[in-house]
Image (cartoon, helix red, strand yellow):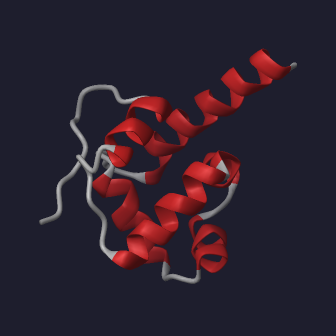
Amino acid sequence: MLETAMAQAPNFRSLKERIARRDILFPTRVEEVARLCFDHPELLAFDSTSDIARRAGVSSSTVLRFVAMIGFANIRTARRIFQDEIRLRSQVYG
């Protein structure tokens, strides 16, 4: 059964933990997008939907399904979480 993330202000790490606990389950193609985006958060933070889809070998609509399944109404709001993670990493490693 497919589940979506809670609507309460998630962050990158809490989403990743929920996925690891299998609180959020993805169909196979959407899981490919999830793996790519969590392994390379800069992609969702800055690349276009079509670029992400091409890298994952899926359609753009699959990328948007991933975004919806992690609890966001659109890719713009999802980008903020991934951009925040990039900023956090740059502060820690900078």
Q: In the drawing, does residue 43 fall left or right of residue 17? A: right
**Residue at 17%, 63% in the rendered image:** 2
**Residue at 59%, 61% in the rendered image:** 36
All told, the count of numbered labels is 0
Q: Position of residue 87 (x, y in %)?
A: 70, 25
For the N terminus, the image quarter is bottom left
Q: In the drawing, does residue 23 fall left or right of residue 89? A: left
Q: Position of residue 46 (x, y in %)?
A: 68, 49
For the C terminus, the image quarter is top right
Against 37, residue 84 (above or below) is above
**Residue at 69%, 33% in the rendered image:** 86
Q: Position of residue 21 (x, y in %)?
A: 30, 43
Q: Residue furthest right?
A: 94
Q: In the drawing, does residue 36 fall left or right of residue 30? A: right
Against 72, residue 6 (above or below) is above
Q: Residue furthest front?
A: 21
Against 60, residue 84 (above or below) is above
**Residue at 40%, 65% in the rendered image:** 64
Q: Position of residue 38 (x, y in %)?
A: 56, 50
